[in-house]
Amino acid sequence: MRCGRRTGRRCRTRRLRPSPASSPWAPTRPGWQPTRHAPRRSAVEIGNHVGDRDLDHEGIVQFLQHCAEVGAPVFVHPWDMPNSARLNRWMAQWLTGMPAETHLSLLAMILGGVFDRVPESLKICFAHGGGSFAFWLGLENAWHQRNDIIGTSEKPPSTYIGRFSVDSVVFEPSALRLLVDIVGVDDVLLGSDYPYPLGERPVGEVVRRASFLSEADRARLLGGNAAEFLNLPALWETP
């Protein structure tokens, strides 16, 4: 996620710091308290799960509640993907594992009732366009047809659109269009996935190539949305 002011070819950026909440032991360790270990300002990056505990684990929910209280935005990036002979070829852990991990964590936020428990003021963004979530939102019919098993949230999944943001790292304008259509243009933030080898290079190229965007919307994706998410002044101007 990036935002900044263009100066020639340079762009000032704001770094996110890793949080102890993404340590495998932090939220369940005796004495761990979100008020001591969660950020009090700026922004924080966490992994999408803690061992076998997803984002609906009580300790992580308390962490997110504290982030909302102090106004600290949270960026979620997948990590620690499953390992198997099938996934160890072709970087499949990254190509299929990461989108699935992020999708699973968004399900945990929704079906695990996290969005029902944390204040609407929580700013949380998911990497890689939210994984496969946007493409499979139509499976909400399962929430209605098997509500006895899946209806664990107060509302259907689609009603939580607007409670989270995603980054723009989806690599093709057609995929970006689907993302904007589902999530909304105000909740897609410029992403790069830097320094990982499969990140977008040059940063923002897909947004610039997206002919369906108006210039105002393009400017929002290239920096305006990220500035708002990070509680920064509007630093990116429409070309």
Image (cartoon, rainbow, N blue to C red):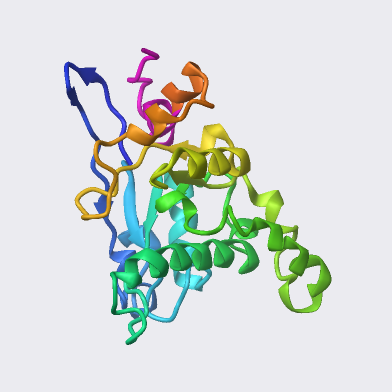
Residue positioned most to the bottom: 85
* Image coords of residue 68 (percent x, y): 48, 48
**Image: 100 above or below 11:** below
Residue 53's spot in the image, x, y percent? 45, 77
Q: Nearer the viewer, residue 70 or 1?
A: 1
Q: Outermost residue toward the right? A: 145
Position of 94 compared to 141: left or right? left
**Within the magenta stretch, is there residue 229?**
yes
Q: Residue at x 17, y 16 (%)?
A: 8
Do we see residue 123 in this rendering?
A: no
Magenta highlight on residue 202: no
Residue 148 x/y as whole percent:
80, 78
- The quarter of the picture where residue 73 lies is top left
Q: Residue at x 36, y 12 (%)?
A: 239
Visible residue check, residue 97: yes
Q: Which residues are magenta?
A: 221-239
Up/down of 68 relative to 54, above or below: above
